[in-house]
Image (cartoon, rainbow, N blue to C red):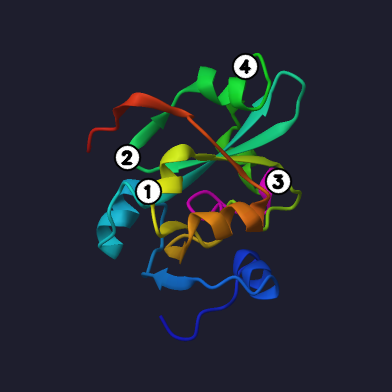
Amino acid sequence: MSKETKTNAMRILDKLKIPYELLSYDCDKFESGQKSAEILGLDPETTFKTIVTVGKNSAHYVFVLPVNLEMDMKKCAKAVGEKTVETIHVKDIQAVTGYIRGGCSPIGMKKQFRTVVHESAKTLSAIAVSGGRPGVHLLLSPADLIDACAGEYADIAALREITKK
């Protein structure tokens, strides 16, 4: 890629003076988080996906977890004090977040939603999250991610890993 156009996530990190490394590849269609990690040569345990949900009270919640893990919907609901949560429909991602599928960053959404990051991030020196556009990832410390998105840690993953397809 030539000079990278800044995304909202990058602008926010710059404004907060939070250091990050930009990782990118040419991407003309949606790639799974696992595929993105593979293309970038990243460990799936340190590459995190962003999933937006809605609770029974119509509030939106953001969950950030390693691409090789599945969400545990009961744990997610419990983490945000809801009875249940469900993922939003793909067609609603841009309207709710301002980002498109495959480029949804936990940083810089249209509104600041309650954000929960999988607790495994606490043990890592750096994690990669979507940078706000498909094929763009940001490598930063988990503590800096928590600061940038006003996040919190919780156990939100199922015990099983996603198997490669």
Asked where in the image residue 38 lies, by quadrant, the reply is bottom left
Q: Give the mark nearer the N terminus: 2 vs 3.
A: 2
The disc label shown at residue 68, or none:
2
Please state which of the two labelled residues, at mark 2 or mark 1, is closer to the viewer.
Answer: 2
Q: Position of residue 161 (x, y in %)?
A: 29, 31
Residue drawn 44% across the image and 85% down it:
2
Q: Position of residue 11 (x, y in %)?
A: 66, 72
Question: Label 2 to label 1, Cα distance in Å?
Answer: 8 Å
Q: Position of residue 134 (x, y in %)?
A: 47, 60
Q: Amino acid at mark 2?
A: Asn
Residue drawn 68% across the image and 23% down it:
55
Q: Give the mark nearer the N terminus: 3 vs 4.
A: 4
Please state which of the two labelled residues, at mark 4 or mark 1, is closer to the viewer.
Answer: 4
Q: Which residue is mark 1?
A: 33
Question: Label 2 to label 3, Cα distance in Å?
Answer: 27 Å
Q: Give the mark nearer the N terminus: 2 vs 4.
A: 2
Q: Which residue is mark 3?
A: 95
Q: Amino acid at mark 4?
A: Thr
Residue pushed farthest front? 123
